[in-house]
C-alpha cells in the first residue's frame, strides 16, 4: 500500500493525511500531510510509544540510500561469473608458477637465490660472469638478446624465453670479448649518442 506520492513529498508539497498502516514488527506508518511518522505500538497499555518523524529532506536522503544499496547488490548470476573469473585467473597463475619452478630447478641453487619474479618473468640480478655462463648453459633459450643495462651502462642484460617462461639476466657482467662503446648517430635535424655492445666471434655468449 502506498502511503504517499513520492514526487509530491520530494518537492515538499503537502498532501492529505493518511491513517496509520501496520508495517510489521510493531511498527506503524502514517502521514500527517507533510511528513511520514513511524510509531512503535505492540498493543499493550504500558507499551512505550516512540515516534520518528521523517521530513521530506530526510525522505529524499533515505531514498538515495536505498537506491545506492540497490546498485551495489549484484545479481546472483553476475556474482557467480565473477567467482569463475577469479578461479580461472588463479588457475592460470598457478600454471605459470609451475612452469617457472621447472625452469628454476635447472639452475644451480646458489644462483636461484639471486632470482625474483618480476612482471611475470624470472629476473636474475647482478650476476658475475661465471653465474651468467652457468645460467646460459643450463637454460637453452635458442636466442638470447643482449642490450646495454639502462642503469649500469658497463653491464648488459640478457633476455630469452625458456619453455614458455620469460627469463632476464639483469646487470650481468659482459664476456671478455665484448665491450660497451658510445657512438654518435645522426637523425634528421638531430645528433644522438647511443651505447652499443661490440663482441668478437670467439665468445658467442
Image (cartoon, helix red, strand yellow):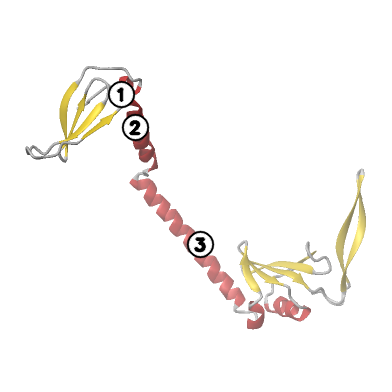
Q: Residues within 10 Å of mark 1 (few under 14, many from 20)?
A: some
> Which residue, as the protein is rendered here, is positioned at the far left?
45
Q: Is residue 143 left or right of 38 when viewed as pictured?
A: right
At 79% from the left and 68% from the top, the residue drawn is 156
Taking the image as shown, residue 108 lies to the left or right of residue 8, namely right
Q: Residue at x 38, y 49 (%)?
A: 79
Residue under label 3: 92
Question: Which label's residue is closer to the chain start, 2 or 3?
Answer: 2
Determine which quarter of the picture holds residue 129: bottom right
Who is closer to the viewer here, 40 or 60?
A: 40
Of the numbered discs 1 and 3, the one sitting upstream in the chain is: 1
Give the image quarter of residue 132.
bottom right
Q: Looking at the rendering, in which quadrant would you find the N terminus?
A: top left
Left or right relative to 38: residue 198: right
The vertical placement of 197 against 42, above or below, is below
Q: Residues within 10 Å of mark 3 (few under 14, many from 20)?
A: few
Cα distance between the residues tagged 2 and 3 = 43 Å
Helix, strand or loop under label 2? helix
Q: Is residue 99 above or below residue 43?
A: below
Q: Position of residue 88 (x, y in %)?
A: 46, 58
Q: Nearer the viewer, residue 106 or 69?
A: 69
Tell whether 176 sits left or right of 158: right
- Which residue bears the numbered disc 2? 63
Q: Earlier in the sequence, mark 2 or mark 1?
A: 1
Image coords of residue 174 (percent x, y)? 81, 73
- At a point 88% along the width and 70% down the height, the residue shown is 179
Q: Residue at x 57, y 75 (%)?
A: 102
**Picture quarter containing residue 48?**
top left
Location of residue 84 in the rendering, given as x and y in whole percent from the top left corner? 41, 55
**Which disc, if any, is residue 6?**
1
CB-based contact (under 8 Å), mark 2 and mark 1: yes
Judged from the image, the secondary structure of the residue bearing numbered disc 3 is helix
Amino acid at each position: 500500500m502506498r502511503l504517499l506520492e513520492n514526487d509530491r513529498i520530494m518537492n515538499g508539497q503537502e498532501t492529505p493525511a493518511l491513517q496509520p498502516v501496520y508495517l510489521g514488527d510493531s511498527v506503524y506508518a502514517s502521514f500527517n500531510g507533510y511528513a511520514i511518522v513511524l510509531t512503535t505500538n505492540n498493543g499493550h497499555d504500558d507499551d512505550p510509544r516512540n515516534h520518528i518523524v521523517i521530513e521530506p529532506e530526510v525522505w529524499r536522503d533515505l531514498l538515495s540510500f536505498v537506491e545506492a544499496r540497490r546498485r551495489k547488490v549484484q545479481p546472483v548470476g553476475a556474482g557467480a561469473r565473477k567467482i569463475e573469473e577469479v578461479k580461472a585467473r588463479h588457475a592460470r597463475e598457478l600454471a605459470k608458477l609451475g612452469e617457472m619452478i621447472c625452469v628454476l630447478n635447472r639452475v644451480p641453487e646458489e644462483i636461484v637465490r639471486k632470482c625474483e619474479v618480476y612482471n611475470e618473468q624470472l629476473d636474475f640480478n647482478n650476476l658475475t660472469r661465471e653465474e651468467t655462463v652457468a645460467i646460459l648453459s643450463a637454460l637453452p633459450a635458442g636466442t638470447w638478446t643482449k642490450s646495454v643495462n639502462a642503469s649500469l651502462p658497463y653491464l648488459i642484460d640478457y633476455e630469452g624465453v625458456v619453455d614458455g617462461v620469460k627469463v632476464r639476466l639483469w646487470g650481468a657482467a659482459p664476456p671478455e670479448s665484448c665491450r660497451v662503446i658510445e657512438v654518435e648517430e645522426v637523425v634528421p635535424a638531430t645528433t644522438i649518442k647511443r651505447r652499443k655492445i661490440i663482441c668478437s666471434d670467439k665468445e658467442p655468449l
